[in-house]
Amino acid sequence: MCNFINKTRLISNNSKGMYMKYFAIIILFGFLACSKYQDNKPNTIIQEGWSVSEDELVGSLDPFPLIIEPNLSNVSDILSLSDDASVAIVYFNDQVNIYPLSYIHRFEVINDRINDKRFAITFCPITQSVICVNNEEQNSFLSLRASGILYKENLVMYNENSQSFWSQMYLLGIKGAFSNTELKSLSMFETTWLVAKTFFPEAKVFYDERSIHNDKTIPKNERVFGVIENLFSKKVYIYQYSDFLNSTKIYYPESINKFIVVGNAELNYIAAFIINENNAFTPLQNSFPDIMEDSHGNTWNIFGIATKGPNAGDRLKTPFNYLASWWAWKSFYKQFEFIEYHQIKKGYQMVALFKIKLIKY
């Protein structure tokens, strides 16, 4: 994404004869031609108007290919993905779409639509962050693409019509007509290709044959799940897959925004949902994609939709959340709460307890 120019220093020495002089002239013209070409490319880093520190911006405006409503394939037609490949899954208007990260890799942003629901799947390979974005603003469609610029080593998205730029991990406009305007995140979860094709065999899949070689380039280490309380406090609740070992589990963090975090390490998912204070949720085992039930007799699935009960068909809202590399979280946010485990002896058994620990950076 970043273009680097190796500067060549020409040394002229009369004692080396006419041959070396001619050679130096040829090299000089080549360097000038290269410099002229680079000057013709827009370089937004040197322009004014950024709402963030320009010291933390790298690269130049060199937009990636714009992908809008691509053709999708059937699950049965995808033969090149390994079972442990990471995928992002969305559900709108009774349709499930699957976006393998290795296929998004070449574009980083996919603008898509399911019936009247527009959205963009965004993926930064460096910070390993995947976010589903509402790309409609004031009833207008915002076609998003990777700009070629990074902010804090993270994807900066770009809309050509408005000449606007957004930080992905903040989902905040950092330049242009939408500066300091938040994009809204939409419900999405990540899992493996094995889980996706097993439980959603009728889904549609984004496929890019030129990206097949990237299947093994998506590192899976150090990624943690975070729920952002709000952009003003910059406080994030952090969860690891190890917090959901052996079974489906639900956590109730103490937050100004009432939400729960549910996950299962074996099925490789973590999700968060906003809930009412007068409702209690219990995890379901061996019922995926149904994952929990509540005190009112409803059963809820991984998309936050009530599949059974008096509220059948309703959908829970989601807080701003996503998976990303731990180092990237620390770069963007300063306060974290995470689960810290302890073991105590109760009778003849060791019982695992947990508490929330606040860390500031």
Image (cartoon, helix red, strand yellow):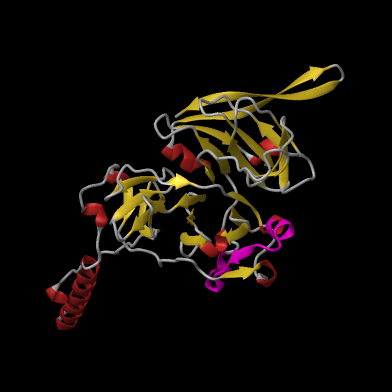
**On the picture, is 158 further left or further right than 316?**
left
Measuring 30% from the left and 59% from the top, which residue is drawn there?
60
Q: Residue furthest left?
A: 14
Give left or right: position of 203 versus 29.
right
Q: Position of residue 228 (x, y in %)?
A: 49, 35
Q: Camera-side residue: 290 or 88?
A: 290
Q: Position of residue 309 (x, y in %)?
A: 73, 39
Please give the range of residues in magenta: 196-214
Residue 201 lies in the magenta-colored region: yes
From the top left corner, tell me how far across and down residue 215 is, in percent.
59, 64
User: Where does residue 254 sit, x and y in percent of width and height?
Assistant: 57, 24
Depth check, front residue: 4 or 279:
279
Where's the C terminus, which quadrant? top left
Q: Is residue 241 left or right of residue 119?
A: right
Q: Is residue 286 above or below residue 122?
A: above
| Picture residue at 44% right of the left edge, 66% below the top | 67
Image position of 352 with respect to 21: above or below = above
Q: Is residue 143 visible?
A: yes
In the image, what residue occupies the spot 38% across and 53% down?
Answer: 139
Res. 9 in view = no
